[in-house]
Every structure is written in structure tokens, then in C-alpha cells.
Amino acid sequence: MRMKTLFTLVLFAALLAAPAFGAATITIVNVDGAGEGFNDPGPPLLPAPGNTGTTLGEQRLEVFLAAADLWGDVLESDVEIFVRASFDPLFCDATSAVLGSAGALVVQQDFDNAIFPGTWYHAALANKLAGVDLDPPPPVGLQGDDIQARFNVDIDNNPACLGPNNWYYGLDNLPAPGTTDLFQVVKHEIAHGLGFSNFANETTGALFLDTPDVYTQFTRDNTTGLLWSEMNDAERQASAINDQNVVWIGPASTNEAPNILGNPPVMEINSPGGIAGTYAAQGATYGPQLTAAGLTGNVVLAIDGAGPDPNDGCEPLTNGGAVAGNIVLINRGNCAFVTKSVNGDMAGATAVIVGNNIAPGLPPMGGTDPGTLNIPSVGISLADSDLIKGEPDGSVNVTLQLDLTQFSGTDANGFMKLFAPNPVQQGSSISHWDTTASPNLLMEPFINPDIGTDTDLTDELFADIGWFAGGVNVLEIPTIDTVGMIGLALLLLAAAFWVMSRRNRKGEVS
């Protein structure tokens, strides 16, 4: 029996054949009132790059239509997909904001051609698999019940929201300084509604109506070896904060990751012997990047002499004599990562290490390259930062380099890591790639300036959950603990056929 229920917003066949590429029609349904959002006449605007709208509302709509066209070109469905979209006041203060939110309005299970029985599917994906609209709109009334998307109108209208920051309405992936790229945000949020999200409550571990969803069928905890669809509530609750140990096991994503991702930075502590070893690091999106050869030096703690933290590097360093020619360690917090790196560079450091101020996890190290930096920057965990501080200043010798044996954002098995910070970040945890991926990906929890115009690994995840003909069925995949190496190799080889057939297609929408 087919079941369905309305669902509130969320943030957010093993033999493969080459898919017959089709297209999907994605329709934006404007649910803004008169004079607001898409209907805001605003002051007359000059056309933004690629955007022909002449009013504020028209430019907003042009961005949404471009994002809908992009996903429509990528996806395959004979059933029209409706996105109810609006601009509304969302949380925002001087330094942080909810840019947007989107999710499935309806979820479905046990329909014709469902890959997993007893499993919730996002409405648009369910309709695609079934080949019909499982919840058609009434003859009279508002069209569309697939996806609802809301975006923060205050980023344009409220000077207290992110200071002078405004939305950028260009379609060229080159946002002007002091703006936020709406096109990337819309691409990101529509992807959540299309299937890049689960319906579980990460705080309690509870499934929606005690039923797994298609996203949980691919979400695995490396500590327990269990899929989220196999866990009880307490196990999911613990897994949601198991940072760096929750992964996506979809074969298409796993096979394509090496073609998208770079090698991750690591910090090798050479001495003293008591703490020697290899430690995880997060590369910065700005400034010179590390190489495989890397650089070696002693670590000196930054001192700027100013509150609230004299070691946060938010002001010019006062111990430049000690820092010069060495690697400088700076505490996270109170100012941008780029500011810390610039102050370390000006003091003569050979590299900057930013120690996290929360546990666990690595600093995200995002920012825009000022074009003046001469040294690389990385972030390390709070625990590792404290380990270095526990030794006499300047006595710890480290090498910062790339690890050529791994790809950033993946585990030892090559599976993509999912974002699982402690504590839970509602609307962000699990339903995003982890922030250790480099280059940054569209479906990380933060919109970074180095995201490309491509859809990177997003359409591979969509292939995993069933969006494309000949997609992979994870029911055929045992856990990594029980699968034989030959079987795994064959599985990834099969996924490779799908990925190779997609690669030229991805170029069409880049």
C-alpha cells in the first residue's frame, strides 16, 4: 500500500548500463506576496552578469530560473518538478545568517519502482521512479507540492544583517566583494529538496515516523559498521556527532571522488618524540597551497597582546622576532582566518597553523584570497593545538605537507565523509559533505567562494539514490567489513562505467 504524508522543511540492479540521458522540467512557483520577494519592484537595477532582470524581483527570479534549468539539464524525469519559492526574513545578525532553507514538502514510500521497500523518498525522486505524479495538485489552487524553498530577504533589506553584505545576482560565479552568491545558494538548496538530505532527527536519532529514508540507506557509521537505516535511535544519536566517522557508501560518489578531490594536508610532528606522529589538518581556501614536499619548521605561539585573546592573531603580532623564520600557531576566533594569516605573514612566519577553539573537528579555513599572502595556512584540532602548547614554545618541530595516499574529505576506504560535528548543527549535520573536502564542494554546509560552476559530486550522490537510469542499488552492497576485495573492485568498476558516461554530460552544465 502506498503511503504518504506532508513533511516540514529540512535543510538542508547492481549491473550498470550507460544511462539514456533525458531531462527534467523544474518549475519555480512564486509564492511571494505583492511587492515582496520576487515581486519587489525595488530601485531600477543594472543587469548583473548573465542576468537580464531590470528590477530587484526580476533579478531574483532570473537566478532561480537559471538554477532550475541547471538541475533540469542534469536530472532525468518525465514528471514535472515544482519548487515553491519565496523570500522571507530568516535568522540574521551582524556576523552570521541563515541564507536559505529547502526540503521536500511530501515524502512517499512503497510506490511502483521504489528501490527500497518501506523507505521514504523525496517527492520529486519518488515521482521520477514511479513515472507519475504520486500527489498531483488539485484542479484549482496552488501548483506544486514537491519542494519548498525560502531565502533570506534581509540580506538585501536589513543593514543589521551581515553588515553591508547583499545578495549577488550575477550568474558568472564571480560575486562582487561584500556580496553572497545567490545562484550557488539556490543550487545548493534545491539539491536538498531533490534528495541530498535525510528525514531523521539528528538530535534524538529518531527516524521520521520510525521509517528509514533513502539517504539513510547510504549513510554509514565507521565505528559501528552500521547503516543509519539499521540503527536504533540511540545509535543514530551517537553517530550524528561521531565527527570524521560518518560516511556515504554510494558507489558512484566513491568512484568519482578521486577525479574531483585533491590530497589532504597533514601535520607531521617530528619532535619531541613523545608527541611525534601524523595529525590531520585542514587546508585554507586562500593563499599559497601546500605541496607534497611540504615545509618544515619549529612552531611558535602568536602573541598580539590584545584582548579578548592575546593569541588570536587578530592584531599585528608583538613577538615578530620569535615568529620570523618559524611556523606560527594562532588560536581560532574573534576575526577572519585571512586576518590571522596576513598577520602571521607580516611577522615573517613561514606558515600559519590555526588551532581550533571547539572540540572536536578542524577549523573550516574559509576566506577570500587577498592576493598578498606569501605563506600557506592550515587548521588543526583543539586537542592537537593544546598538545603543541603543552611543550616549551618553539620546541615542537613539524612538517606541513600533502598526503598523497588519500583524498581530502574521504575515509581510508575512499568513502566520502559526511558532516557530523559535535554538538549537532540542526539543518546541517549529516545532510552535507564534510568540510574537510578540498576543493570545496557545492553541498558542504557553508557556501565557499571557490565552489565551481559544475555540480561536482552532487549528481553522483543523486545517481546513488536512483535519479538516473541504471543507477546503483545499495541493497547489493554488503558492509565494507564483509565484502571481499574482488567484489568491491567489481562494484567500483561497474560504477566507473556510469561515471565515465556522465563526465561529458557534466561539462555541458558547467
Image (cartoon, helix red, strand yellow):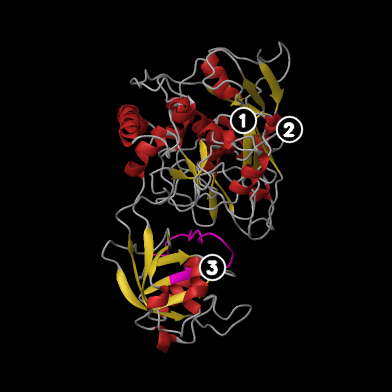
Under mark 1, the amino acid is Pro
Q: Looking at the figure, which quarter contains the C terminus? A: top left
Q: Which residue is mark 2?
A: 33
- Residue 427 coordinates in the image, percent (x, y): 63, 44
- Residue 391 coordinates in the image, percent (x, y): 47, 82
Question: Mark 1 or 3, which is nearer the eye?
Answer: 1
Between marks 2 and 3, how big is the CA–CA gap? 47 Å
Residue 128 included in the magenta stretch of the image: no
Under mark 3, the amino acid is Leu
Magenta part of the protein: which range? Answer: 353-372
State whether the magenta stretch is mostly helix, strand or loop.
Answer: loop
- Chain-order first, disc 1 or disc 2: 2
Under mark 2, the amino acid is Gly
Which element type, helix, strand or loop, lies under badge 1? loop
* Label 1 Cα neighbours within 10 Å, binned few <14 / some 14-19 / many ≥20: many
Tag count: 3
- Chain-order first, disc 2 or disc 3: 2
Residue 212: which numbered mark, if any?
A: 1
Decide if residue 381 is on the left or right side of residue 20.
right
- Chain-order first, disc 1 or disc 3: 1
Residue 382: which numbered mark, if any?
A: 3
Query: Observer-nearest residue: 46 or 354?
Result: 354
Which element type, helix, strand or loop, lies under badge 3? helix
- The structure residue drawn at horizontal position 42% and vertical position 38%, both measured from the top left corner, is 480
